[in-house]
Image (cartoon, grey):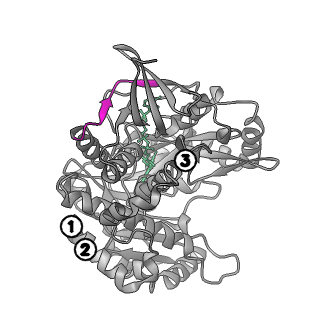
Amino acid sequence: MSNVESFDVALIGGGIMSATLGVLIKKTNPEARIVLFERLPQVALESSNPWNNAGTGHAALCELNYMPDSKDGSLPDASKAIAINEQFQVSRQFWSSLVQEGILGSPETFIRTVPHMTFVTGSKDVDYLKRRHKALKDQPLFSGLQYSEDLKTIGKWAPLIAEGREKGEYAATYIEQGTDVDYGAITSQMISWLETQGVEIHTGTEVTKLYQYHDRHWRVTSKSKQGRLDIRAEKVFVGAGGWALKLLQNAGIPEIKGYGTFPVSGHFLRTDNPEIVARHHAKVYSQSAVGAPPMSVPHLDTRVVDGKTSLLFGPFAGLNPKFLKSGSLLDLPLSVRPANVIPYLSVALKNFSLVQYLISEILKSKKQKLLSLRDFIPSSDLQGWELYEAGQRAQVIKPVKGGGTLQFGTEVIAAQDHSIAGLLGASPGASVSVSVMLDVMQRFYPDHFAQFEKPLTKLIPTYGKRLNSDAALAKKVLASTAKTLKLKA
Ligand SMILES: Cc1cc2nc3c(=O)[nH]c(=O)nc-3n(C[C@H](O)[C@H](O)[C@H](O)COP(=O)(O)OP(=O)(O)OC[C@H]3O[C@@H](n4cnc5c(N)ncnc54)[C@H](O)[C@@H]3O)c2cc1C
């Protein structure tokens, strides 16, 4: 094994998670020898690609699924929404520091202000949104959240949504500080910087095997057009998106036993028609249909990619056994192991209505999908909207006593010996990538983590603090990151 090159860290996958972890490691330990493998010809082509996700800077400003209604009509619990917003502020601070250091380019290349709005109809949801607003409006990180039941005001915020509606029960919240983010641009820019720091980037190279030596280091075997490559790494991060399950199973760590993946495909309708695009400037989230998973909440989004503005509507979820958009139809069947058969079966049985919903979504014709857009923008011209395939969401199936449970968040799976970790799951995803990768850093370096705090605080000034609990600090951080990232404060 003497001719096998050695690294401190091997990153598998060229998405936003590996890129973020690579930058965090290089900024805390510039001497670290890092290698990154990406199976596709370029980085950021899977879920982190701007056309494969919705680009929402998830801060719970508009997404109802992060703050479900209470059961008894009292104010809904805001704690999860606040925690997600705090995590997004960690990302905002990190990206601001990277702009200041020239690691990320001009902010317009990856982030912009797009107001976030929630729109609901019917007395039940109107009442819920009103209480949601009441619970959030005085929270420091939600400052500026407005509420209205008046169609004229809603029309000022989002003309396409209000036009053509009869009198009825409507409500909306609106906040200017929302964002649209190009996570693909962030990924590519971070990886370009890593390359300048001596990180070896192998694109078109698929990791096929992970083997642990007696000294706990890993042999990472990959294949590319050039042939097989073996390297040795002290730590391995499996940032392979939907394929993380497969690689962690291949590594044979006990911590992955019983886990499975529930893949949900996503399609969006998109228009570039300048007349329609010019009449909408917001990300408008609504309530999900009965039986629908939280990530299929319908939303109408302003989306800016490479300086060009489009509108997206969707997502239309569906069942597809691939764990990556460019994965294999065998991904699901080949992921079944004796330890996860019961979790898989129990999730299928417990979530029968979800499976039915996903099948019904697949069976919808393009015309039916356009008609659901009509529910959102009643009087708009439906010409010029095209349906396209976005990324695959690989949701986590987690083993629990007596079966399995379907989770809609992300989960870090780490070996007890701190030598390997991977990320399962999708939501809130790229928005909270920095917090999630800080968690991975803690799993990798539990004994040395304290010494990283100083460089981390330079990158994330409120590192370790609950930002929403300190109104003055929250205001200051929102203002300073807005200034650097050229966002509305
Ligand atoms: C439809 C949809 C909408 C979404 N909307 C949002 C949103 O609005 N806001 C938000 O914050 N998040 C959103 N997300 C989630 C977000 O896109 C993901 O959480 C994030 O991009 C995941 O990044 P990643 O680096 O883990 O994975 P990816 O970007 O998928 O990267 C993983 C990489 O690993 C590579 N790889 C896999 N296996 C191997 C191997 N064996 N060897 C080498 N390389 C390998 C893949 O080719 C891929 O490039 C959305 C996701 C989807 C699917």
Please check the rendered image and state whether residue 202 is part of the magenta-colored stretch, yes or no.
yes
Dividing the picture into quarters, in which one does residue 259 lie? top right
- Would you call the spot at circle 3 few (<14 residues within 10 Å), some (14-19), or many (20 or more)? many
Which quadrant of the rendered structure holds the C terminus? Answer: bottom left
Range of the magenta residues?
197-207
Looking at the rendered structure, the kind of residue marked 3 is: Gly
Residue for badge 2: 480
3D distance between C-alphas at marks 2 and 1: 6 Å
On the rendered structure, is 124 left or right of 173? right
Residue 473 percent coordinates (x, y): 35, 81
Residue 199 percent coordinates (x, y): 29, 36
3D distance between C-alphas at marks 3 and 1: 31 Å
Q: How many marks?
A: 3
- For label 3, being within 8 Å of ligand 1 is answered yes
Looking at the rendered structure, the kind of residue marked 1 is: Thr
The circle drawn on residue 425 is 3
